[in-house]
Amino acid sequence: QVHLVESGGGSVQAGGSLTLSCVASGSTHRSCLAWFRQAPGKEREGVAAIDSDSVARTRYAESVKGRFTITKDNALNTLTLQMNFLKLEDSAMYYCAAGPDSYFNRWAAEEWYRYWGQGTQVTVSS
């Protein structure tokens, strides 16, 4: 069993930065860890993912490439999403998720993820 708790959301002006964190209790060994987001009236979408390989391969949605960075600290069992140059369209509830590493190549498909956090709200204003 894995329990995920996100933090770090808040309100920021466009162009600003936020750092989201997700602390996992339970083993995330051999897990793909990811961030998803859901804006009101829209489907949940994958934002970024990182696998359990020692190289820690990453994947990003096209909309956030070059602006967001996903990292993990295995010692602290913490997943981080550094978000820079935030845009209005980045406003959403952000969720941390963990799933089998074997599905890393399908990282953006939420059905592969077994564990989800409760979410943290990010609001970007002009």
Image: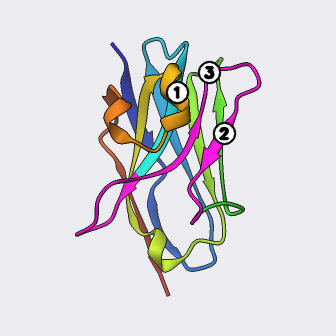
Mark 3–mark 1 distance (CA, rounded to whole Å): 6 Å
Residue 66 vs residue 24, the one in the foreground? 66
- Farthest residue toward the right? 55
Provide the residue span drawn in magenta: 37-63
**x then y, percent, for residue 112:** 37, 30
Mark 3–mark 2 distance (CA, rounded to whole Å): 10 Å
Q: Tell me if residue 67 is in the magenta stretch.
A: no
Question: Mark 1 or mark 2, which has the lower sequence index?
Answer: 1
Mark 1–mark 2 distance (CA, rounded to whole Å): 10 Å
Assign a secondary structure to mark 2.
Answer: strand
- Identify the residue position indicated by label 3 in the image: 52
Question: Mark 3 or mark 2, which has the lower sequence index?
Answer: 3
- Farthest residue toward the front? 105
Residue 6 vs residue 107, the one in the foreground? 107
Tally of numbered discs: 3
Residue type highlighted by circle 1: Cys
Q: Do callouts 3 and 1 mark residues in contact (Cβ within 8 Å)?
A: yes
- Farthest residue toward the left? 41
- Identify the residue position indicated by label 1 in the image: 32
- Identify the residue position indicated by label 2 in the image: 58
Is the residue 46 above or below the residue 26 in the image? below
Q: Tell me if residue 48 is in the magenta stretch.
A: yes
